[in-house]
Image (cartoon, grey):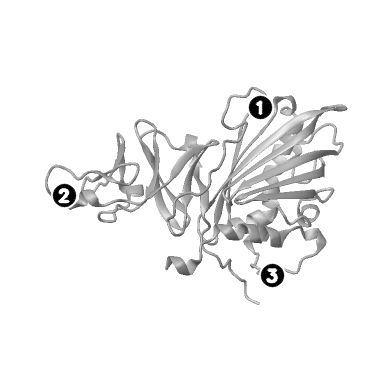
Amino acid sequence: MPKQEFPFPMPNGWFCVTRVGDLKNEESKSFIFCEKEVVAFRTKSGKVSVLDAFCGYCGINLAISGKVDGETINCPKHGIKWNIDGTCAEIGKDGMVPQKAMEVETFSYPCQELNGFIWAWHHLLKEEPYFDIPAINGFNDNDSKWGKEHHYEYHINTVLQEIAENDVDQAHFPKVHGSPSLPETEAIIDGIYRKTIAETLMSPNNDSVSEEFHVADPTMFTTTFTRESWGLGCVGLHMVNLPKGVNEFGGEFIMINASCPVDNKNSILRWSMRVTKDIEDELGMAIIDGIANGVLDDMPIWDNKSYVAQPLLCDGDGPINKFRKWVGQFYSDPLQAR
């Protein structure tokens, strides 16, 4: 049987374009976002915009040739200036561009800066945002209990749904990641929001942890692992009750997975992770390193996987069909967009 490609269009929702710190004032960058080339730029005053890369007047690629000038980005061919909302700010004073060009717009994606990332809203039918992503504790404040923020980026050869399904496929944890137990999972769903709470047994020196981060006391421990999803683009994770020493618990771990569909075969994951300072020196780094490396175990599977519309599931596989029903709300009928 030939490999079956993923059959659905780009999902709707908030997706990560880049990190806040990677776009400086009066700078523009090119990105592929949900199969479209876009230009992200920051104005002189610090405002962020994500526009269709191609000038609405004559199709010049602003991501390649455009220049940020004050509060606008300028088309190099005719000197037309575009506001952050995609409206035309100025057509030039030499009379070479017709006045009617002031009515032209370049498509603007709703965007925001939150949790250390720049997010843009994608909807196949260009509908306005109908849900929000929240500010996640530990990534938007100066709470002194948290240690250094660690950043990771992965380019994955599959779609976001396949990546997200991995988290509900409980049977793969011991086989692929060497987890000592299957997580006991409880799922809560409220519209676009999905939350799972798992009690799981962890080994601080599991197979994914680099030797340099192995801890002196490899005793396994039980932790509560909470995962929250707002659509397919934003996932927050929180582990509590991590050991701080002999018979002493209370350490915490937090993470954001900010994702972006590139096209129907590729995705980008941008992760930020932190632990509380009381476990940062040893166990915390083992946890961060193990999670960062764990995705590398999944990548060969994703690279060569065929999509199965109706998989034959067993009890240990987890609620994959229920998950797919939840995910279905983020797709527009592709026929509607033609």
Instruction: Tell me if label 1 and label 2 are in contact, CB under 8 Å.
Output: no
- Residue farthest toward the bottom in the current orientation of the protein: 1
Residue 158 is at least partly visible in this image: no
Q: Using the rendered view, name the quadrant where residue 270 is placed.
A: top right
Q: For mark 2, what is the residue?
A: 99
Q: How crowded is mark 3: few (under 14 residues within 10 Å), some or many (20 or more)?
A: few
Q: For mark 3, what is the residue?
A: 310
Looking at the picture, tell me which residue is in the foreground, 135 or 302.
135
Q: How crowded is mark 2: few (under 14 residues within 10 Å), some or many (20 or more)?
A: few
- Residue farthest toward the front in the current orientation of the protein: 190
In the image, what residue occupies the spot 70% across and 25% down?
277
Q: Which amino acid does label 1 sit on?
A: Trp
Marks 1 and 2, the one that precedes in the sequence: 2
SS for tag 1? loop
Looking at the picture, tell me which residue is in the foreground, 114 or 6.
114
Marks 3 and 2, the one that precedes in the sequence: 2
Q: For mark 1, what is the residue?
A: 146
SS for tag 2? helix
273 over 277 or under it: above or below: below
Q: Using the rendered view, name the quadrant where residue 305 is placed.
A: bottom right
